[in-house]
């Protein structure tokens, strides 16, 4: 496992683009026309943002990647504003921007207003079925949270992930959904666990 740099940008984008091809939340956000190309653009935006402001990890076998953020003060950034404008036009589609903004506003309000490690993405390629990559990345993020004495927050739109996260010590503290579109997001938290 290693911390990615700008040189790893393409590799990380390839891993996450494949991993999120059928992710419900990602597919709900992107415009359905040229869906796969739009997923790649969404992933590129996310990886660029995290390389600037967070931490990007790559598993030892280069089959998995994870993105996380530690607490920080928000800074005004022209590149971030430009990235969001491109996201609106190239990924979401201008007619759905208002709907997506409402969702993002709700998500932001659901995040607990305490210092935390935000576990944004964890993606593993389909040919890495042994679980080694995801375990390696997850354990590293857990170590960072423990070192910084921070709870971990994440969201998932995959119902099958909930039990897995619960086995890791996460609990659901909120849920958002659109019944008509069968779209749900579970907000989960794992408290900082002190060693005895």
Image (cartoon, helix red, strand yellow):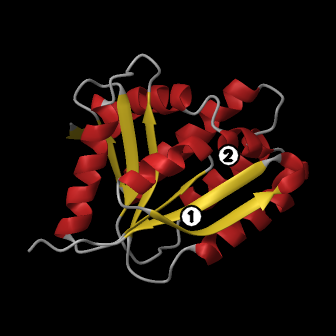
Seen at 76% across and 43% down, the residue is: 28
Q: Secondary structure at mark 1?
A: strand
Which mark lies nearer to you, 1 or 2? 1
Query: In this view of the protein, can residue 5 be seen by the observer?
Result: no
Q: Position of residue 9 (x, y in %)?
A: 40, 34
Kindly indicate the quadrant of the structure image that contains residue 92. top right
Q: Position of residue 66 (x, y in %)?
A: 38, 44
Crowding around mark 2 (Cα neighbors within 10 Å: few <14, some 14 to 19, many 20+) is some
Q: Name the residue that disc number 2 marks.
A: 25
Query: In this view of the protein, can residue 156 be seen by the observer?
Result: yes
Seen at 56% across and 45% down, the residue is: 45
Q: Nearer the viewer, residue 80 or 11?
A: 11
Q: Is residue 107 above or below residue 39?
A: below
Left or right relative to 181: residue 134: left
Q: Secondary structure at mark 2?
A: helix
Quarter of the image that includes the N terminus: top left
Q: Name the residue that disc number 1 marks.
A: 187
Q: Position of residue 171 (x, y in %)?
A: 47, 65
Left or right relative to 118: residue 144: left
Q: Earlier in the sequence, mark 1 or mark 2?
A: 2
Seen at 28% across and 54% down, the residue is: 141
Q: Residue extending furthest left?
A: 196
Crowding around mark 1 (Cα neighbors within 10 Å: few <14, some 14 to 19, many 20+) is many
């Amino acid at each position: 496992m290693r911390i990615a740099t700008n040189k790893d940008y393409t590799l990380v984008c390839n891993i996450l683009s494949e991993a999120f091809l059928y992710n419900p939340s990602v597919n709900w956000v992107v415009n359905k026309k040229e869906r796969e190309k739009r997923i790649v653009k969404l992933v590129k935006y996310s990886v660029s943002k995290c390389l600037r402001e967070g931490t990007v990890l790559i598993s030892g076998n280069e089959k998995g990647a994870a993105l996380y953020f530690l607490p920080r003060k928000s800074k005004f950034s022209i590149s971030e504003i430009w990235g969001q404008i491109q996201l609106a036009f190239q990924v979401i589609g201008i007619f759905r921007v208002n709907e997506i903004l409402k969702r993002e506003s709700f998500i932001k309000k659901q995040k607990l207003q305490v210092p935390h490690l935000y576990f944004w993405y964890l993606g593993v390629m389909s040919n890495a079925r042994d679980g080694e990559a995801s375990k390696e990345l997850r354990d590293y993020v857990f170590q960072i949270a423990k070192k910084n004495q921070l709870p971990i927050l994440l969201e998932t739109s995959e119902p099958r992930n909930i039990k897995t996260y619960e086995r890791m010590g996460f609990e659901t503290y909120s849920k958002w959904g659109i019944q008509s579109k069968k779209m749900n997001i579970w907000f989960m938290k794992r408290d900082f666990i002190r060693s005895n």
